[in-house]
């Protein structure tokens, strides 16, 4: 059955983004592709093969259900890391499949040991330490006790990584906090090293940290938003822009394009209200088109009377409220407009473009939120 809209995902854009990022990071640093939130809306099953074709061999998820999806998409030799939620009863499945996971509190540590005993295989763990994010992570004063337990149960645990996460590396407003976090992380690292504990992978950086704080680039970085072609924030882009040599073109390319079609067209008289309620009254004789994309498809209701789409390469305004399944747009000024014509909601058409960032300007919805709210049911097509 046909859907009311579809998403296109560009393979070549992905490859260019990774190339740019790897150049920034240096060749020694492994990129872990963060695919939580259904790969930021792109679809885990789409992104994993595209990433593997680009040489990515490490994937990070938030939870075990996402890890399950990645597991079913990867080819041999790729690794999976879970950074957040794991139900203790999922641990055996995870350990059996060599999936590594964050340990940030004693309950999970003990559960991991127990599950490892049962499975007969070591649990691959990343020790997350509290450096100032104040969400998850072992505290500074827990480290001795932590090490005692880890050493006592060495036969059940394989220490893979020592990690932390920064509280807002995308804004200079958090500069002092991030700098303090880096310092605290290094204190943890030194402390473990002095105790003779060396981790194979030290990793702390997300996209923003990798781009703005080079000292956070270690053995591995966890790249989410940037691989999909978005800057973590306008600020990150601006600060990087100055360093981008030569032509100063944005090196990150959006993968996603969102397209629909005109469902129907009708004319309305001056003074007619369009759609539910009375939020829009026609100020002239108008021609309006229905586009079958609404808030159930991820087109926010906040874009009522605000959103734009592209038809025939022109910026066309949403008139009236965004409804569950559709929007109405003003096509009065288009010469010949027909049912079935292409409508671009995100992306390029002729020489015009609607970016994902433009949504955040009108609705406060950040890139991350808009992308992950795109329903899984919308078909995704891989394009060159
Ligand atoms: C989401 C996440 C990342 C990736 O963040 P981006 O800003 O998308 O690069 C990295 N590390 C952790 C722990 C995360 O939760």
Image (cartoon, helix red, strand yellow):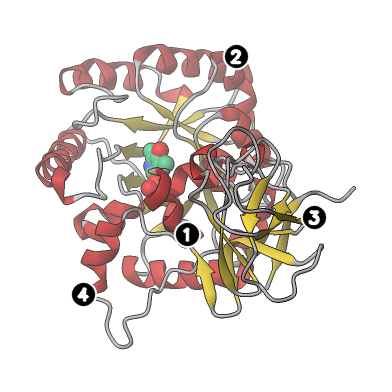
Above or below: residue 231 compared with residue 40: below
| Distance Cα–Cα, label 3 vs label 4 | 47 Å
Residue indicated by mark 4: 242
Q: Which residue is mark 2?
A: 89
Seen at 47% across and 41% down, the residue is 369
**Splitting the image into four quadrants, where does ligand 1 fall?**
top left
Q: Nearer the viewer, mark 3 or mark 2?
A: 3
Mark carried by residue 264 = 3
> Does label 1 or label 2 sit earlier along the sequence?
2
Residue 61 position within the rendered picture, expressed as x and y whole percent measured from the top left: 52, 38
Tell me the tag on residue 227. Answer: 1
- At a point 60% along the width and 75% down the height, the residue shown is 313
Tell me if the residue at label 4 has its CB under 8 Å from ligand 1: no
Please name which of the two marks, 1 or 3, marks the residue nearer to the observer.
Answer: 3
Give percent across and percent down for residue 350. Answer: 60, 79
Determine if the C-beta at disc 1 is less than 8 A from ligand 1.
yes
Q: Position of residue 262 (x, y in %)?
A: 75, 59
């Amino acid at each position: 059955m046909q859907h009311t809209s579809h998403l296109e995902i560009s393979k070549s854009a992905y490859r260019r983004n990774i190339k740019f990022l790897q150049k920034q990071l240096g060749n020694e640093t492994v990129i872990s592709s963060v695919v939580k939130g259904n790969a930021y809306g792109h679809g885990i099953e789409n992104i994993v093969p595209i990433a593997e074709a680009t040489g990515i061999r490490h994937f990070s998820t938030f939870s075990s259900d996402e890890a399950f999806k990645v597991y079913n998409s990867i080819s041999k030799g790729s690794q999976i890391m879970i950074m957040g939620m794991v139900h203790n009863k999922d641990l055996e499945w995870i350990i059996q499949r060599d999936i590594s996971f964050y340990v940030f509190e004693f309950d999970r540590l003990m559960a991991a040991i127990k599950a490892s005993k049962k499975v007969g295989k070591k649990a691959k763990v990343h020790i997350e330490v509290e450096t100032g994010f104040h969400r998850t992570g072992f505290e500074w004063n827990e480290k001795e006790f932590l090490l005692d337990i880890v050493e006592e149960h060495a036969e059940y645990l394989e220490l893979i990584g020592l990690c932390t996460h920064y509280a807002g590396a995308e804004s200079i407003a958090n500069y002092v906090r991030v700098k303090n976090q880096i310092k605290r992380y290094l204190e943890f690292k030194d402390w473990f090293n002095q105790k003779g504990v060396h981790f194979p992978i030290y990793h702390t950086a997300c996209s923003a940290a990798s781009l703005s704080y080079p000292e956070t680039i270690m053995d591995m970085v966890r790249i989410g938003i940037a691989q999909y072609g978005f800057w973590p924030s306008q600020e990150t882009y601006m600060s990087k822009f100055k360093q981008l040599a030569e032509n100063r073109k944005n090196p990150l390319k959006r993968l996603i394009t969102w397209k629909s079609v005109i469902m129907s067209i009708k004319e309305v008289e001056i003074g007619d209200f369009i759609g539910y309620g009375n939020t829009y009254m026609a100020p002239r004789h108008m021609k309006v088109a229905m586009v079958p994309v609404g808030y159930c498809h991820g087109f926010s209701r906040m874009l009522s009377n605000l959103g734009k789409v592209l038809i025939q390469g022109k910026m066309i305004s949403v008139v009236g409220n965004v409804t569950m399944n559709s929007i109405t747009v003003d096509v009065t000024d288009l010469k010949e407009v027909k049912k079935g014509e292409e409508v671009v909601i995100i992306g390029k058409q002729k020489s015009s473009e609607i970016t994902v960032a433009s949504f955040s300007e009108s609705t406060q919805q950040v890139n991350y939120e808009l992308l992950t709210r795109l329903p899984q049911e919308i078909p995704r097509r891989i394009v060159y």
